[in-house]
Amino acid sequence: MKRIVWLMSLIMVLAFAAVGCGTKTDEAASTGTGEEKSLKLGIIQIVEHPALDASRQGFLDVLGENGYKEGENLTVDYQNAQGDQSNLKTIATKFVTDQADMVLAIATPSAIAMASETTEIPILITAVTDPVAAKLVQSNEHPGGNVTGTNDMTPIKEQFDLLKKIVPDAKKVGVIYNSSEVNSQVQVEMAKGVAQDLGMEIVEATVTGSAEVMQVSQSLVGKVDAMYVPGDNVVASSIASVVSVAEKNKLPLIVSERGMVDGGALGTIGIDYYKLGRQTGEMALRVINGEKPAEMPIESLKDIDIVINQGAADRMGVTVPQEILDQAKEVIK
């Protein structure tokens, strides 16, 4: 009898142990810990051009370096609006319907479209000039919602200082931008104040789409001494048209970021968008690990570098002072 009781007790102990082990396994699977953790990422981008593409790559590289591999535990749905604002709402709605875990919104128009569709899905923004002016966050210090990330506020004063050093006699500067982009409006208003302090006048030339960039650039010929392109997505995607006009008419062209210098502009002093994307990726990891976007301040990239395109300078009839060439991080031949 005692033997039967002992056997029954042993069976009950083993049974409880098995149940306990099963519970832990189920909990590990449901919480997504360890290697089973996965991420369904949506990426919404207004248009393709080097700066925005670099920020996207930087973001994805950080995820990859931290164990998120596409096709394994990372699903990426990359959607490009092809410069068409009307496509952004369709893309944003798709990500909500598909129940993305997180969305990377690249550039101001993309971020506005995404934020208007959801207050639940965490949205990481990058290449957004002024998140407050775009009404994406309550403040840079305390976003207060489901949006956080990095801004790409252009160092406009430094860029106009660069222009003045290269073209000291410049009095009128043509600024080409898309008047419907909030980020561009903010930059142009800043440029007006900076130019006035330097004794220069801004001549505005606005476009509504990439097809107008060539014609609008040509409209500045004979009216200005130099041209400037802010961080504008429409114009950046068609920078070859501006460069063509600048070269043909010997108009120095200073721009807001490195990608446009690679595309033939004279030079810039600006941020590295790949580094900016990486910084946004680091913020995404914090959100994945439980931090709330509402409590994560908007960040900016502090490092700025001078990049000069010597070939472009020659074609535009400009002699870049040796002092600037010595300070440049890179001189493109």
Image (cartoon, grey):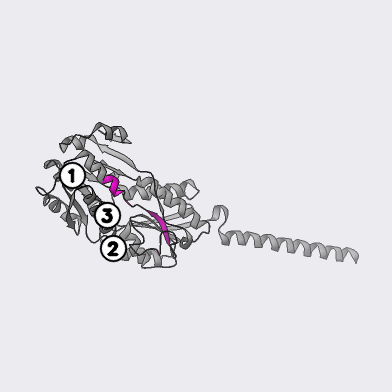
Mark closer to the observer (2, 3): 3
Magenta run includes residue 121: no
- Image quadrant holding the C terminus, namely top left
Q: Residue at x 23, y 54 (%)?
A: 192
Disc on the earlier residue, 1 or 2: 2
Q: Quadrant of residue 193?
A: bottom left
Q: Nearer the viewer, residue 14 or 200?
A: 200
Residue drawn at the location 46% of the way across and 61% of the way down: 293
| Residue designated by label 3 | 190
Query: Horizontal and vertical percent for residue 287?
Result: 49, 57
Residue at the spot of label 1: 243
Check disc 3 and give the amino acid type: Met
- Give, as a single range, the part of the protein colored magenta: 136-159
Left or right of 44 on screen, residue 317? left
Q: Determine if residue 211 is in view.
A: no
Image location of residue 99, percent across then percent down:
43, 65
* Residue nearest the viewer, comparing 259 with 219: 219
Residue 50: tell me if it is visible.
Answer: yes
How many neighbours does mark 2 have within 10 angstroms: few (below 14), some (14-19), or many (20 or more)? some
Q: CA distance from mark 1 to mark 3?
A: 23 Å
Q: Nearer the viewer, residue 275 or 137?
A: 137
Q: Residue at x 18, y 34 (%)?
A: 314
Q: Pick out the residue farthest to the right.
A: 1
Residue type at tag 2: Asn
For marks 1 and 3, give the one nearer the viewer: 3
Q: Amino acid at mark 1?
A: Val
Question: Which comes sooner in the sequence, label 1 or label 3?
Answer: 3
